[in-house]
Image (cartoon, rainbow, N blue to C red):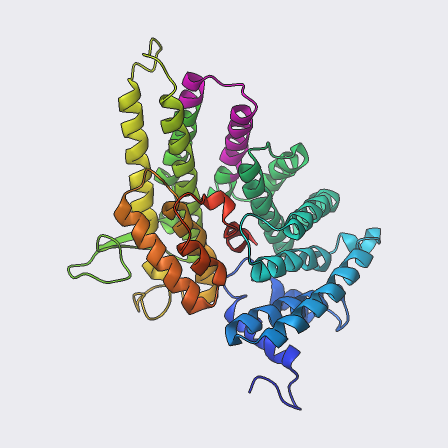
C-alpha cells in the first residue's frame, strides 16, 4: 500500500519522487530548496503535482493522475499569484515552481510535438531569468536554475530555427564570470548561439546551398573541437565486449564519469547529426563546385553520412551504462536512480531513430531500446515513438521535454 492513515498518498508520492526521479536529474537542488518551503507555498504544491503524476504512471493508477491534475491547477494558480509580487517572483522557489509545472506537462502529455502549456511555462521561465539579473549567479542553486532554463530555451530555438533571445545571450556572457574558464558547458552554450543564428539564416532564405554547406561544415567542426578538447575528467572509457549483449550496439560500451557528462557529449552528437543532415540536403542542390570548397556533391554527402554514422554509433555506445541495473555494468561510477538515466538517453535514442542517413542497424537498435525503456520506466511517450514510422523527427517527438526539464 502506498498510503495509510499515517502517510497520506501525497507524502508517499513525494517520497517516491524525491528518491526515484530527483537525484541525478536537473532538479538535484530541489530537496534542499523544498525543505525550506512552507506547506501551502507554490513550490510545495507544484512538487506534489509532479510527484503524484510520476507515482500515477509508476502504479498505473488513473485516480492518482486525477488528483495530480487537481493539484497542478492549484499550483498553477498559486504560482501565477506569486509572479505578481516583484519580491517573490525573483526567488529561487518561484522559478523552480515554473519548471515543475513544465515537468508536469512533460509527464502527462500524450501527443507529439510540444504542448502549448509547456511552451507557456518556458516563456515564463525565460522572463524570470531576465528579471533575476546578475544576482542569480551568486549562488550554486541560482546558477543551476539558469543553466536549466537556458538549456530549455536553446532546444526550443533549435526546434523553431529561431535565434536565441539577445537578453539570454547577454546573461550567458555574464554567467561566464562565475565559472572556470573554458568550462565545457560554457563552450557548448557559445556554440549554440552560432548554431541558432545559422538555422535562422537558413529558415529565412539568406543562404545559398553552397553557403549553407560551408556554414554547416564550419559549425560541425566547432563540436568536433569541443569534444576533442574535453577535460580528462569529462572523458569516457571505451569497452569492447567479446560476447554479444542484447543491450549493446556493435559490442561497444562507453563509460562516462556520470550521465550529466554523457548528456553533453550526446548533445554535441545530436547537433552534429542535425548539421550533417542539413549539409547532405543542401549539397544535393549544388551545381558543380567552382568554389574554394573544391569538393563534389558526392564527396560532401559521403562525409555527411560518415559524420552521422559516427555520431549514431557513439550515442548507441552511451546507452548501456544508463539503461538500468539489469543491463548496465555493475562497476559503473554513476549510481543515480534509473529515471534520471531515462531523462538523459531517451531523446538521443530518438535522434538516431529519426536520422534517415544513419544505418538501419543503429536505428533498429534505438527503436528497441526506446520500446524497452519506455515499458520499463513507465514512459508511454517513448513506447509510442518506438512504434512510429521513421518520418517522425526527434525535434518533433516531445522527448526533448524529458531531456532538458
Task: Mark yes or no: residue 8 visible.
Answer: yes
Quadrant, the N terminus? bottom right
Say if the magenta span includes residue 33: no
Q: How many marks?
A: 0
**Left or right, 115 with reference to 93:** left
- Determine the residue located farthest toward the right in the rendered image: 85
- Determine the residue located farthest toward the top in the rendered image: 290
**Left or right, 309 with reference to 10:** left
Query: What x and y, as percent, mark residue 245?
Result: 23, 62
Q: Tell me if residue 118 comes above or below residue 63 in the rendering.
A: above
Q: Quadrant of residue 247?
A: bottom left
Say if the magenta span includes residue 207: yes
Residue found 36% across the figure and 22% down from its top? 283
Residue found 78% across the figure and 62% down from its top? 78
**Left or right, 242 with reference to 12:** left
Span colored in magenta = 189-214
Query: What x and y, as percent, mark residue 137?
Result: 65, 47
- Determine the residue located farthest toward the left in the rendered image: 242
Q: Tell me if residue 213 comes above or below residue 134 in the rendering.
A: above
Residue found 39% across the figure and 27% down from its top? 281
Residue situated in front as seen by the camera: 255 or 297 = 297
Q: Tell me if residue 321 comes above or below residue 267 in the rendering.
A: below
Residue found 27% across the figure and 23% down from its top? 299
Query: What x and y, as percent, mark residue 279?
Result: 39, 27
Quadrant, the C terminus? bottom right
Residue situated in front as seen by the camera: 307 or 355 = 355
Query: What x and y, as percent, mark residue 244?
Result: 19, 61
Q: Quadrant of residue 173?
A: top right
Name the main secondary structure of what is drawn in magenta: helix
Task: Mark yes or no: residue 317 visible.
Answer: no
Amino acid at each position: 500500500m502506498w498510503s495509510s492513515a499515517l502517510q497520506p498518498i501525497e507524502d508517499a508520492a513525494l517520497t517516491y519522487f524525491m528518491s526515484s526521479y530527483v537525484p541525478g536529474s536537473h532538479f538535484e537542488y530541489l530537496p534542499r530548496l523544498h525543505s525550506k518551503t512552507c506547506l501551502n507555498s507554490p513550490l510545495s504544491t507544484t512538487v506534489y503535482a509532479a510527484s503524484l503524476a510520476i507515482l500515477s504512471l509508476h502504479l498505473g493508477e488513473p485516480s492518482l493522475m486525477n488528483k495530480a491534475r487537481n493539484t497542478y491547477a492549484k499550483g498553477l494558480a498559486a504560482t501565477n499569484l506569486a509572479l505578481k509580487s516583484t519580491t517573490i517572483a525573483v526567488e529561487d522557489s518561484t522559478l523552480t515552481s515554473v519548471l515543475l509545472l513544465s515537468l508536469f506537462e512533460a509527464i502527462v502529455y500524450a501527443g507529439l510535438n510540444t504542448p502549448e502549456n509547456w511552451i507557456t511555462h518556458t516563456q515564463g521561465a525565460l522572463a524570470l531569468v531576465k528579471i533575476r539579473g546578475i544576482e542569480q549567479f551568486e549562488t550554486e542553486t541560482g546558477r543551476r536554475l539558469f543553466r536549466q532554463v537556458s538549456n530549455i530555451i536553446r532546444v526550443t530555438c533549435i526546434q523553431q530555427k529561431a535565434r536565441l533571445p539577445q537578453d539570454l545571450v547577454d546573461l550567458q556572457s555574464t554567467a561566464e564570470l562565475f565559472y572556470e574558464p573554458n568550462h565545457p558547458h560554457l563552450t557548448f552554450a557559445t556554440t549554440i548561439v552560432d548554431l541558432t543564428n545559422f538555422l535562422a539564416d537558413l529558415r529565412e532564405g539568406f543562404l545559398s546551398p553552397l553557403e549553407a554547406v560551408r556554414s554547416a561544415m564550419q559549425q560541425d567542426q566547432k563540436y568536433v573541437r569541443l569534444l576533442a578538447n574535453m577535460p580528462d575528467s569529462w572523458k569516457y572509457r571505451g569497452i569492447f565486449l567479446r560476447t554479444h549483449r542484447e543491450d549493446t550496439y556493435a559490442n561497444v560500451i562507453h563509460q562516462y564519469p556520470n550521465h550529466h557528462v554523457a548528456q553533453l557529449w550526446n548533445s554535441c552528437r545530436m547537433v552534429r547529426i542535425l548539421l550533417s543532415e542539413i549539409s547532405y540536403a543542401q549539397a544535393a542542390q549544388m551545381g558543380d563546385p567552382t568554389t574554394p570548397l573544391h569538393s563534389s556533391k558526392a564527396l560532401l554527402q559521403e562525409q555527411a553520412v560518415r559524420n552521422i554514422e559516427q555520431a549514431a554509433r557513439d550515442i548507441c555506445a552511451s546507452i548501456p551504462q544508463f539503461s538500468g541495473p539489469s543491463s548496465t555494468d555493475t562497476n559503473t561510477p554513476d549510481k543515480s536512480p534509473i529515471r534520471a538515466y531515462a531523462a538523459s538517453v531517451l531523446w538521443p535514442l530518438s535522434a538516431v531513430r529519426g536520422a534517415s542517413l544513419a544505418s538501419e542497424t543503429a536505428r533498429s537498435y534505438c527503436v528497441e531500446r526506446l520500446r524497452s525503456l519506455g515499458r520499463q520506466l513507465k514512459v508511454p511517450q517513448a513506447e509510442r515513438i518506438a512504434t512510429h514510422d521513421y518520418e517522425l523527427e526527434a525535434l518533433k517527438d516531445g522527448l526533448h521535454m524529458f531531456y532538458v526539464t
